[in-house]
Amino acid sequence: MKRVFLIIFALGIVSCNLPASETALTPTQSPFPIFTATSTLLVPTELSISVSSETPISPTMTVTPIPCDPSTADYCIVDGTFLFQRPIQPPDNDRIDLSYAYASTQNGKRDPHHGVEFQNAFGIPVYAAGDGEVVFADADKTTKFSPWTNFYGNVVIIQHANEIYSLYAHLSSILVRVGDTVNAGDEIGQVGATGGATGSHLHFEVRTGSAYTDYFSTQNPELWMLPPQGMGALSVTLKTSYERNYERPLVITRYADGSDDPIYTYYITTYTKGFEFNPEDAVLSSLPPGKYKIAFSDSSGLKERFVFVEAGKLTEVVFDLDG
């Protein structure tokens, strides 16, 4: 599905020793100082030797970054781009609804999803995910943020640095106005079911680029939001020679600490057609730290890989299906 994928860097150490001089012993040959004879004089009664004050050259060490390349390594654990907090905060439900994940269709039953959903009751507070300026705060009756009007209902859009936007849809009420400056954690609206919503929830998107009305400028919000306290995130990329996505089932199993006993299984799919512009093909956040196995099938058979997830970090995994 992808020719392009993320490469994340980690630190490693490479050491090298300077070459020893022709007359000096290497440090591994003797632990003592190195003496060099500079002159010898014969006298009738004794041999006199003068000794130079030269000291051995100490070996040096340099530190060089060694990149962790997820296309060659089993996985890479990186900091991630977690710029945003979650727009729903505890004690309310801050977990993403996996039944209709980003770029999924519920097995063809619904339109491809350009955001994620937080299932919550009518009137639950919605908070700004980051600092920024409100650029839209109204119903989408005339301005299109999708192929249809009145799709998102009451919408708030916040512009953040570097042409990044967060979108909050289906709100029951809007508490900000265009031009307002907001900080992460400010209440901007309340959960509702306006527009095309089938029930009370918050639809949340992250868009990039200058045209924030572009329906296809979305990114997976799970890569942008900090995981809940003590949790980590996982992204999976399937590298292929063709540029056509389809929803491929993935089975991701979590194992008990220090054992090979499975304790929970996640059933998700890779991104559907139309999301080839995303470098990754599937994301899971809110994962407890520990050992996981990713499994799926392709034309060559079953693919499996064990990886680890760390709290507050992103584990990146790339499968080269052409290799």
Image (cartoon, rainbow, N blue to C red):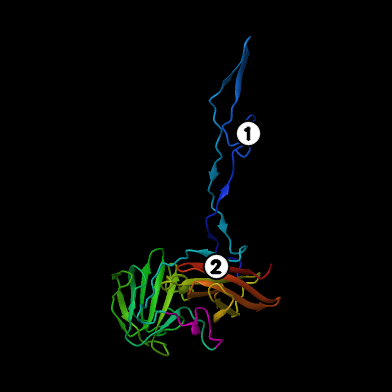
Front one among 261 and 1: 261
Q: Indicate whether 21 appears above or below 223.
A: above
> Where residue 296 sits in the image (x, y, percent)?
63, 78
- Residue 25, numbered circle: 1
Q: Work out whether 190 lies above or below 206.
A: below
The foreground one among 123 and 284 is 284
Magenta part of the chain: 95-108
Whether the magenta-drawn stretch holds residue 68 is answered as no
Residue 180, image x, y percentages: 28, 71
- Residue at point 30% right, 73% down? 186
Point out the image quarter for the C terminus: bottom right
Q: Say which quarter of the image contains residue 253.
A: bottom right
Q: Which residue is rendered at x = 61% and y = 36% of the image?
A: 30
Helix, strand or loop at label 2? It is: strand
Residue furthest to the bottom? 198
Q: Residue at x 57, y 34 (%)?
A: 32
Q: Seen in the image, is 131 located left or right of residue 69?
A: left
The residue pinned by badge 2 equals: 316
Q: Is residue 300 left or right of residue 147?
A: right
Left or right of 100 in this view: 303:
right
Q: Amino acid at mark 2?
A: Glu
